[in-house]
């Protein structure tokens, strides 16, 4: 982790941050789980898939758990059918036994499977048919996170793979996937559930006298608020789930411990933008507080330039120079007059045409120079824009690095388009392993 | 049946609740804030609400974290005012209990039991009911003289992937809680959300995934009968070079480009000269630019087929700050004037 960037340009820009040794992490047989987390829209899913492809081609038996992949990415990996089980990805792997399997999380199916696995057939059917359960499992805050962690636990327990790469849900906050399972677990096992359960357990009016006044006030209030039908749905659900309660918290706790285990590595994924890096900083702090092992930061969509010796200011000045400069030069001076002439009235245009006719050769040369000047000015303006982007990204990143100088960073150069095939994932993998953006 | 179309700036009947969604990373908070500024023209008052607890609005305006309270955050040109509120589901629920049931101490008891936690984070959709309910309350609120307190309420909403579910949750809850106050509340909120009083805008970039999500989002909103407003294409970059020029520059004109760079004062054009060494990297950048332009053109075509009016906001070179926000607001107003 103490490796220092050797690329001179990158070295100059990223003085403090050590480079994240991606290949060493993927090759280490001790690495059993890699969790990719971060804000929405930073390329978590693509990063997870690219790591999976690279690890498999370096000889590991990998499964990638994606949560909500873009359609074409899912298609390219052959996981666009939702059957909630890992599928072998064709065309990935090495001679040394590397394999890639991938799956897309179906949270409702995962929840249903827990129910089916823990209750007898009749009870399971009652739960699955309960309207409250159907809303709960179809997904709202928390369920997706809980089920992602549940699935991770299941995959780990099967022990069919020596590396699991997991993507995290696009939550309100990057921290949700750590908190939501516990929240759901503690609700399902908690006091509130027992209050709700009480009338159902003791059964109707005969039981009411066993409840203290506070409790009947509570269920009365709840029934008033939620409507008696919803409360009854919840109570039926809770009664049916009774046998499974201890299970939920135990499972949530077990997954949480799995995340703290030595074989787990967290990669915080971000883009060099203020919001994404702010989330990343929260995450780094939180992982430290939870004793969860952070491997480093993957910084996607970083811009570089092969001409970074030329500043934005100088490039702009030079562009202006070229756009106005035709006046100095006789031939481009003529060319510079062409546009205004086209807009002028008939007489002016005629005069310009006459002039052009009189010296065909000179005029062609002038066109050439004017075109080249215009093109070159365009190239310079593009470069100035690029340098401004680089400077802005650098400022954003410096803020993160000054907060967390110890966090190793792998930079991935921005691609002009989206990645949706294996070749694209391989290219991302190479950039991840190189860790510094190639000069554009 | 096509859902009602929500209106924004351009029309006389601008929808009073403007919901701004978009894929993560497209800048929906920025667009929502610029829209709040743009609508706060000529002495009008707007409320910008945040529902995801990210404090993105405070950060954008360079202000302290927003409390659960409406406070003035900016003054628009012409004396209009922008207020901001970060809606907190738990506080909204306690307010609601207090307002309708005078549940002071019982509220605390519920909290201790985990009931508030249940309602705001776990119960299907209740959290979203509270958030949308609070926003609709602000839309309908009137002062003593019977005037609306806010001319417009602009919501920085959850991302495109969740927006229909978020807004439609009241329908679902109304079905789940088949009567009672929650049922009634959900019905009332849905009435506002499904009327032309509301407009749901989707922010996108000219990239494949955000555009695809926008297309899916519009289809879902329309199917749910929610009023789609506008598509806002954010962070649009200027185009500097056309492809023919670029091909020429990369081919037989390389030496001429080096000479032009030299003429512009950037060193020698000879092989190995300063200007000559700039040619390759500059052309590489231009090639990237050209392929991006090509991708953007394809995405524009996809957006055109959606048949939803589109606005474009430029990428601000210096990054997002308060001045940039005002710039985007006036850009929105300008484009609305042309609509």
Image (tube, helix red, strand yellow):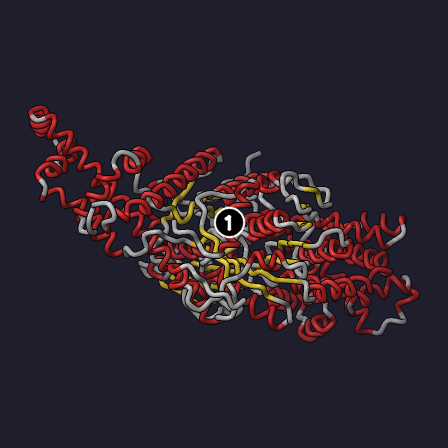
Q: Where is residue B133 in the image (x, y as percent from the top left)?
A: 59, 57
Give how far across and how far down residue A364 sits, in percent: 15, 29
**Residue A349 x %, y %:** 11, 28
Q: Is residue B196 left or right of residue A83?
A: left
Above or below for B117 versus A329: below
- Camera sees residue B327: no
Quadrant of the rendered structure where residue A391 is? Answer: bottom left
Query: Which residue is rendered at x = 19% and y = 34% of the image?
Result: A368
Near-viewer residue (B3 or B35): B35
Asked whether residue B175 appears in the rendered view, the answer is: yes
Give the residue at x 56% y 70%: A285
Q: Which of B5 and A52 is in front in this view?
A: A52
In the rendered image, which residue does mark 1 sit on?
B22
Q: Viewer-proximal residue, B279 or B245?
A: B279
Residue located at (64% from left, 60% from top) = A177
Q: Quadrant of the N terminus of chain A?
A: bottom right
Chain letter of the residue beneath label 1 in the structure image:
B
Q: Residue A370 at what x, y percent from top left?
A: 18, 37
């Amino acid at each position: 982790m103490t490796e220092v960037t050797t690329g001179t340009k990158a070295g100059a820009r990223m003085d403090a941050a050590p480079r994240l040794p991606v290949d060493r992490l993927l090759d280490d047989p001790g690495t059993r789980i890699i969790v990719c987390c971060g804000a929405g829209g930073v390329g978590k899913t693509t990063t997870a898939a690219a790591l999976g492809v690279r690890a498999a081609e370096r000889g590991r038996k990998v499964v990638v758990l994606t949560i909500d992949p873009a359609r074409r990415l899912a298609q390219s990996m052959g996981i666009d059918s939702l059957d909630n089980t890992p599928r072998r990805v064709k065309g990935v792997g090495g001679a040394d036994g590397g394999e890639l399997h991938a799956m897309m999380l179906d949270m409702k199916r995962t929840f249903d499977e827990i129910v089916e696995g823990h209750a007898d057939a009749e009870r399971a059917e009652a739960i699955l048919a309960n309207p409250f359960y159907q809303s709960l499992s179809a997904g709202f805050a928390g369920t997706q996170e809980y089920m992602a962690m549940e699935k991770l636990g299941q995959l780990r327990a099967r022990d069919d793979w020596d590396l699991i790469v997991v993507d995290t849900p696009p939550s309100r906050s990057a921290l949700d996937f750590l908190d939501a399972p516990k929240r759901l677990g503690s609700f399902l096992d908690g006091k509130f559930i027992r209050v709700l359960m009480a009338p159902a357990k003791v059964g109707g009016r005969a039981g009411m006298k066993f409840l203290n006044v506070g409790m009947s006030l509570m269920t009365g209030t709840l029934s008033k608020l939620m409507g008696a039908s919803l409360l009854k749905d919840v109570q039926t659900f809770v009664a049916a789930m009774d046998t499974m309660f201890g299970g939920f918290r135990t499972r949530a706790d077990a997954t949480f411990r799995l995340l703290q285990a030595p074989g787990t590595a967290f990669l915080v994924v971000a883009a060099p933008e203020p919001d994404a890096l702010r989330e990343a900083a929260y995450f780094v702090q939180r992982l430290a507080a939870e004793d969860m092992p952070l491997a480093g930061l993957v910084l996607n969509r970083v811009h570089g330039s092969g001409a970074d010796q030329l500043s934005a200011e100088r490039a702009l000045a030079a562009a202006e120079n070229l756009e106005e400069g035709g006046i100095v030069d006789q031939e481009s001076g003529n060319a510079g007059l062409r546009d205004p002439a086209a807009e002028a009235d008939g007489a002016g245009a005629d005069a310009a045409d006459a002039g052009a006719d009189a010296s065909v050769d000179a005029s062609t040369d002038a066109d050439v120079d004017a075109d080249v000047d215009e093109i070159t000015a365009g190239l310079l303006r593009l470069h100035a824009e690029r340098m401004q982007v680089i400077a802005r990204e650098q400022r954003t990143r410096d803020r993160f690095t000054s907060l967390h100088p110890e966090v190793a960073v792998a930079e991935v150069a921005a691609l002009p388009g989206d990645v949706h095939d294996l070749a694209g994932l391989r290219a991302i993998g190479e950039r991840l392993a190189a860790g510094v953006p190639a000069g554009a | 049946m096509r859902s009602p179309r929500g209106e924004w700036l351009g029309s006389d009947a601008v929808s009073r609740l403007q919901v701004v969604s978009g894929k993560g990373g497209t800048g929906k908070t920025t667009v929502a804030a610029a829209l709040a500024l743009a609508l706060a023209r000529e002495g009008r008052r707007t409320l910008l609400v945040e529902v995801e607890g990210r404090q993105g609005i405070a950060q954008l305006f360079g202000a302290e974290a927003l409390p659960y309270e409406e406070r003035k955050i900016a003054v628009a040109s012409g004396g209009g005012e922008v207020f901001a509120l970060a809606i907190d589901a738990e506080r909204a629920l306690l307010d609601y209990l207090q307002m309708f049931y005078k549940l002071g101490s019982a509220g605390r008891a519920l909290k201790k039991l985990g009931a508030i936690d249940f309602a705001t984070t776990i119960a299907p959709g209740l959290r979203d009911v509270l958030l949308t309910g609070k926003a609709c309350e602000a839309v309908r609120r009137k002062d003593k003289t019977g005037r609306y307190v806010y001319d417009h309420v602009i919501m920085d909403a959850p991302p495109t992937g969740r927006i229909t579910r978020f807004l439609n949750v009241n329908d679902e809850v109304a079905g789940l809680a088949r009567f009672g106050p929650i049922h009634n509340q959900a019905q009332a909120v849905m009435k506002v959300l499904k009327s032309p009083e509301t407009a749901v805008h989707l922010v996108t970039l000219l990239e494949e995934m955000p555009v695809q999500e926008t297309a899916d989002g519009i289809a879902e909103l329309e199917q749910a009968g929610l009023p789609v407003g506008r598509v806002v294409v954010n962070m649009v970059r200027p185009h500097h070079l056309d492809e023919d020029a670029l091909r020429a520059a990369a081919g037989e004109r390389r030496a001429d480009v080096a000479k032009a760079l030299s003429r512009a004062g950037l060193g020698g054009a000879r092989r190995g000269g300063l200007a000559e060494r700039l040619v390759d990297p500059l052309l590489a950048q231009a090639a990237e630019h050209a392929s991006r332009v090509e991708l953007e053109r394809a995405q524009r075509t996809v957006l055109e087929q959606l048949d939803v009016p589109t606005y474009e906001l430029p990428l601000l070179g210096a990054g997002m700050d308060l001045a940039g926000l005002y710039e985007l607001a006036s850009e929105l107003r300008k484009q609305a004037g042309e609509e």
